Image (spheres, grey):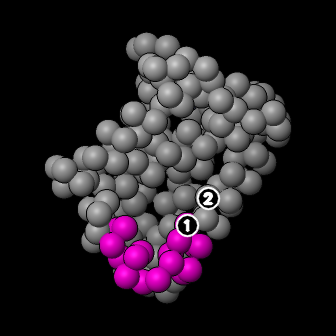
């Protein structure tokens, strides 16, 4: 997926997550969306830095990099929500494009993707981006509303979000 697709995905994800967390049309919800927006968009842009440094879809498109972004809020108490953008970038590259990403790099250079992705420059790219975003938000809704409240709170606290 290109940068435009990743920004669209991240922006919609931030808005959708804000509304899922606080489904009330007020200033409190707008503040949650604002809190999520910049970190998620920055996280979604980060992996493609490897177009300039390292090997694209390998160096910054793997699970160890995601683990680093997950560790920051837990260990240092900062960079909350950036991991969501990074994870969403990976999902969009895996499900939304033909090429896939090297999830286990540097241990294994094989790129994993799904055959039903579309080429990055395809006119169907925006449609696929919206579909992937909708599935991500449905998964988030399932976690938020179907997990027992104590488990959901514990998971958010573990990630430094509460
Ligand atoms: Zn990418």
Q: Disc 1 on helix, strand or loop?
A: helix
User: Compared to 50, does 143 lie above or below?
Assistant: below
Q: Is residue 142 magenta?
A: yes
Q: Disc 2 on helix, strand or loop?
A: helix
Badge 1 density bin: few <14, some 14–19, many ≥20, Cα 10 Å: some
Q: Tell me residue 70's x, y (percent).
A: 34, 48
Q: Is residue 65 left or right of residue 133?
A: left
Q: Is mark 1 within 8 Å of ligand 1?
A: no
User: Compared to 138, does 46 lie above or below?
Assistant: above
User: Compared to 1, does 37 lie above or below?
Assistant: below
- The quadrant in which residue 64 appears is top left
Looking at this rendering, what residue extends furthest in the front direction?
A: 107
Q: Is mark 2 within 8 Å of ligand 1?
A: no
Q: Image point 68% across, 60% down: which residue? A: 134
Q: Tell me residue 16's x, y (percent).
A: 56, 67
Q: Is residue 143 magenta?
A: yes
Looking at this rendering, what residue extends furthest in the left direction?
A: 76
Q: Image point 29% across, 68% down: which residue? A: 157
The magenta span reads 140-156
User: Compared to 118, does 132 lie above or below?
Assistant: below
Q: Tell me residue 3's x, y (percent).
A: 57, 34
Of the 4 image quadrants, the one containing the C terminus is bottom left
- The quadrant in which residue 123 appears is top right
Where residue 136 is drawn, which disc sits there?
2
**Circles 2 and 1: CB distance less than 8 Å?**
yes
Residue 59 seen: yes
The residue to which callout 1 is attached is 140
Between 149 and 45, the one lying in front of the other is: 149
């Amino acid at each position: 997926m290109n940068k435009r697709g990743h920004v669209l995905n991240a922006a919609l994800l931030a808005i959708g997550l804000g509304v899922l967390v606080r489904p009330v049309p007020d200033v409190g919800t707008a503040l949650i969306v604002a809190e999520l927006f910049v970190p998620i968009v920055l996280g979604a842009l980060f992996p493609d830095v490897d177009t300039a440094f390292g090997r694209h879809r390998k160096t910054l498109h793997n699970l160890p990099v995601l683990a680093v972004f997950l560790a920051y809020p837990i260990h240092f108490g900062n960079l909350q929500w950036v991991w969501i953008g990074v994870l969403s970038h990976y999902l969009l590259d895996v499900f939304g494009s033909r090429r896939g990403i090297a999830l286990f790099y540097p241990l294994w250079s094989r790129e994993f993707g799904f055959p039903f992705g579309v080429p990055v420059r395809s006119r169907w790219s925006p449609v696929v981006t919206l579909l992937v975003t909708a599935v991500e938000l449905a998964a988030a809704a399932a976690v938020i509303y179907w997990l027992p409240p104590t488990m959901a709170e514990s998971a958010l606290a573990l990630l430094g979000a509460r």
